[in-house]
Image: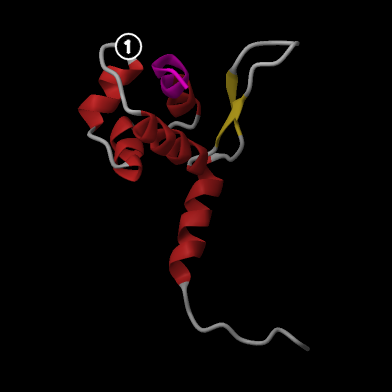
Amino acid sequence: MDGALARAARHLCKVSARTVARRAGVEPKQLRRYEKGAAALSTEQIQRVSDALSYYGAMFVAEDAIGGVGVRRRFTRTNVRMIETWEGEGGPVGSDDV
């Protein structure tokens, strides 16, 4: 994934660079510079950024015989908020047999 694709994914999912950087464990300035092509990230950092963007709903499309690489949205912003709420609810696990 190059910087332009990362930036497109972030904008498509309507999430800030700070939020993606925090989840990926990179500095927001470093992420913004990578998106603009002014800085490089390590392979590990790129994977973490990709994972963070996927978490927020980006789905990366691989290059094939029909077309090049791309990105599309998997979740809406509301769905992401709902998922984050569900993950934080916790509580004891119980039997669901009726």
User: Which residue is depicted at the point 46% across and 56% down?
Assistant: 84
Vertically, is 47 above or below 30?
A: below
Vertically, is 35 above or below 50?
A: above
Q: Which residue is mark 1?
A: 37
Q: Is residue 22 magenta?
A: no
Toward which corner of the image does residue 60 lie, by quadrant?
top right
Residue 98, how many percent across, how many down?
Answer: 78, 89
Vertically, is 94 above or below 51?
A: below
User: Which residue is depicted at the point 29% across and 42% down?
Assistant: 25
Residue 45, how many percent across, how many down?
Answer: 35, 34
Pick the front one: 74 or 1: 1
Q: Is residue 5 magenta?
A: yes
User: Which residue is depicted at the point 57% across and 82% down?
Assistant: 93
Look at the magenta stretch and give its main secondary structure: helix
Regarding residue 15, the answer to whether it shows in the image is: no
User: Which residue is depicted at the point 50% across and 26% down?
Assistant: 12
| Span highlighted in magenta in the image | 1-7
Q: Regarding mark 1 in the picture, which secondary structure is present there?
A: loop
- In the displayed orientation, state which residue is furthest to the right: 98
Residue 16, how many percent across, how many down?
Answer: 34, 32
Toward which corner of the image does residue 24 lie, by quadrant?
top left
Q: For this view, does 42 lie left or right of residue 67? A: left
Vertically, is 83 above or below 51?
A: below
**Mark 1 surroundings: few (<14), some (14-19) or many (≥20) residues within 10 A:** few
Regarding residue 13, the answer to whether it shows in the image is: yes
Residue 95, how many percent across, how many down?
Answer: 67, 87
Disc 1 marks which amino acid? Gly
Q: What colour scheme has been applied to the protein in the rendered image?
A: secondary structure
Toward which corner of the image does residue 73 lie, by quadrant?
top right
- In the displayed orientation, state which residue is furthest to the front: 43
Pick the front one: 78 or 32: 32
